[in-house]
Image: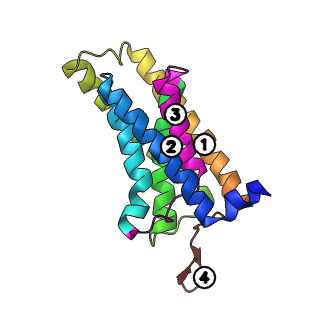
Amino acid sequence: MALDALVTSERLNAVVGWVSVAMVTLWAVESILTGDLLWGGFSLLLAAVASLPALTTRDWLAMVPWPLPFSAAVAVIARATELSTETAGYLGVATLALLVVVELDVFTSVELGRRFAVAFGVLTTMAVEALWIVAQFYSDRWLGTDFLTTQTELQEDIVIVTVVGFALGALFFWYFERVESAGAVERSSDGVESR
């Protein structure tokens, strides 16, 4: 089955991941060239974080499970095509936070239980959203954008991105409970890692 190969093949996982990162990078450059500097910079940050395991290990196969870079690509393309700019922002922030959590769990010696990883992902989503709000504030001030119009909208954004973080975290919890992803690090009881 093609879906089984997509989930278990390390090579296919990396190909889909790299294609997604390439799409994010292309749309980021397009955003920057059209003057959307803040979103373009955020998209480049998404691409850089998704590429980090491969860059640090110098192994192009070292890639997080493909749904994460794919959701980053969906968020960036939805924003760039103005399909759903608000939802794209929430998905982008939650994806960035979950990328960090999954990379910590899979590619470092940090061991996170699945439920804790979801909770940590939600907290990281809230932290990334706070940084995004600060970036929007300074973009409004220095670049003349109008991201932050009312305090009510700001508070709604915080609540919505938290809910999106929970939903995305729960989706990935379900995914990881049912699937042993390509590239996952297995840890034995004595702490020895193997692929």
The amino acid on which the numbered mark 4 sits, given as a three-letter code, is Ser
- Per the model, the C-alpha gap separating discs 3 and 1 is 13 Å
Q: Which mark is residue 75?
A: 3
User: Residue 75 colored magenta?
Assistant: yes
| Mark 3 or mark 4: whose residue is earlier in sequence | 3
Give the CA separation, mark 3 to mark 4. 36 Å
Residue at the spot 60% in from the left edge and 49% down from the top edge: 67
On whether residue 89 falls in the magenta region, the answer is no
Please say if 179 is above or below 169.
below
Of residues 30 and 83, the one drawn nearer to the viewer in this rendering: 30
Residue stretch in magenta? 57-86
The spot of residue 54 in percent (x, y) is 42, 63
Q: Nearer the viewer, mark 3 or mark 4?
A: 3
Q: Amino acid at mark 3?
A: Ala
Pointer 1 or 4: first along the chain? 1
Residue 112's spot in the image, x, y percent?
Answer: 54, 64
Q: Residues within 10 Å of mark 1 (few under 14, many from 20)?
A: many
Q: Position of residue 17 (x, y in %)?
A: 54, 52
Instruction: Give the crowd class for mark 2: few <14, some 14-19, many >=20 residues within 10 Å.
Output: many
Q: Which residue is mark 4?
A: 188
Q: Are marks 1 and 2 in contact (CB under 8 Å)?
A: yes
Q: Which residue is mark 1?
A: 168
Nearer-N-terminus badge (2/3): 3
State whether residue 130 appears in this view: no
Mark 2 touches mark 3? (CB < 8 Å)? yes
Image point (68%, 64%), residue name: 8
Q: Earlier in the sequence, mark 3 or mark 1?
A: 3
